[in-house]
Amino acid sequence: MGQESRRRREARRRSNQRPGADGIAALLDLAVRHAVHAPATAGPHIRVLHDLGAAPPVVDEVVARIGAAWEQGWQPRDLLHASRRHTTAAATRWLSRAILVESHRSGAPHRAPRSWLDQLDVLESSVTPAADELLPSTDHPDQAAWLAALVTLDLLRGLPRVRVVDAVPSQWDRLGRPSTVPETGRIDARQAKALTTVRALLAKAESTDFAAEAEAFTAKAQSLMTRHALDEALITADIEGGVVVRARRILVHHPYPVEKASLLDQVARANRTRAVWDEFASSVTVVGVPTDLDQVEMLFTSTLVQATRAMTHAGQAADSAPVDRSSSFRKSFLVAYAQRIGQRLTVTAEEATASYGSALVPVLARQGEAVTAEFERLFPRVTTTSRRRSYDRRGWDAGTRAADDTVLPSAMLE
């Protein structure tokens, strides 16, 4: 009887000492700091939160903040990309499940546009089933799950706004279920066939180990893309109404994201679009007409593949030095490659435009004005900065040579 009485008294004492909402919030803040900055010391704080039954409110806060992120311009793939950049692999996997939980709670599968559903489908196929119990209600806390949740919560609490490029969830019901027609607009059979051919050519260019073969595939793909974009511009000009301008976010992966973004910027400039780099999100938002956006995205992928192949080859060549595999060499290589490719793409675009005669001049001028107006509306306070840095001379020269060796299709235009 004595031991049982003591247990009851101890239980009452713990109940009387249970912190209120503010106290639990303070404990959660402390646990988040430990999980982010000293995960090895987070265990005791996790146990306290678990014993206090804080798992459901933590999950609720995460899910609510994910929903808030969508309203601030983020989309599922963007958020996971930022998580890979700023957190851990375990936290990113946990966030993937949390995104699916949020989507089911909010009814996204029945309300979201096709592009959003495609992102959710990728998640569904790559993670374990998303039960609501992201933090299991067991006798002992799941340390790994709690650490991932706390790190994710820290990311979401500090998440900045990004530019909205598509309708946000609060607008879905008002706008109605969007059409499944791709963003490029009026895709007829001829255009669909051209885009399918371009993607197939670029896939072959990316899969081959032979530089000459990759260059041939890329050249043919770019030729088709250029003609497709100019044909679309002429066709659209005959239709009443304003020029359709869109914004698209392109994710830039590590390593060397700034240097890769410079390549994307050069491709964008040469193809009548405007680009803005977001360092936190590690992405570039490109503004232009849909056909040009398609061309920029595909051409960036292709030239980046060629640049990476040439950069790796330069570091493995028989006459290479150890410095040719250094970070400085590779950054210099990519920046030089980007600048030279930009020059060559600009010349190619001018030649392609000239081949269409004077009829295209007012059409492209009208497009340019519309793109500039939309860009300035979306980014009224954008700034241009120049990073002062020294470059590795061997890397710069190798990057320039690689860009000169990249085959561009100006001579292939019919």
Image (cartoon, rainbow, N blue to C red):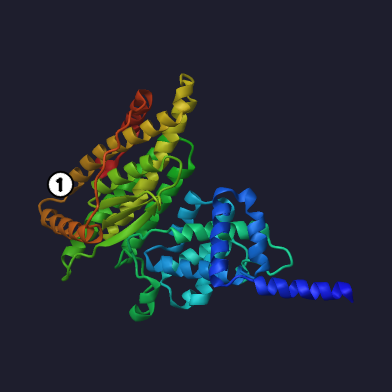
Q: Which residue is drawn at 17% across and 68% down?
A: 242
Q: Which residue is drawn at 13% across and 55% down?
A: 365
Looking at the figure, which quarter contains the N terminus?
Answer: bottom right
Q: Is residue 94 above or below residue 402?
A: below
Q: Name the residue under label 1.
A: 354
Q: Is residue 108 visible?
A: yes
For the residue marked with disc 1, what is the amino acid?
Ala
Which residue occupies the foreground of this view, 71 or 295?
Answer: 71
Q: Is residue 247 above or below residue 13?
A: above
Q: Residue at x 49, y 22 (%)?
A: 322
| Percent coordinates x, y for residue 294 in the rendering | 33, 56
Secondary structure under tag 1 reads helix
Give the left or right position of residue 102, taking residue 251 as reference. right
Indicate the quadrant where residue 397 lies: top left
Give the left or right position of residue 91, taking residue 198 as reference. right
Q: Can residue 115 be seen in this view?
A: no
Which residue occupies the foreground of this view, 205 or 340?
Answer: 340
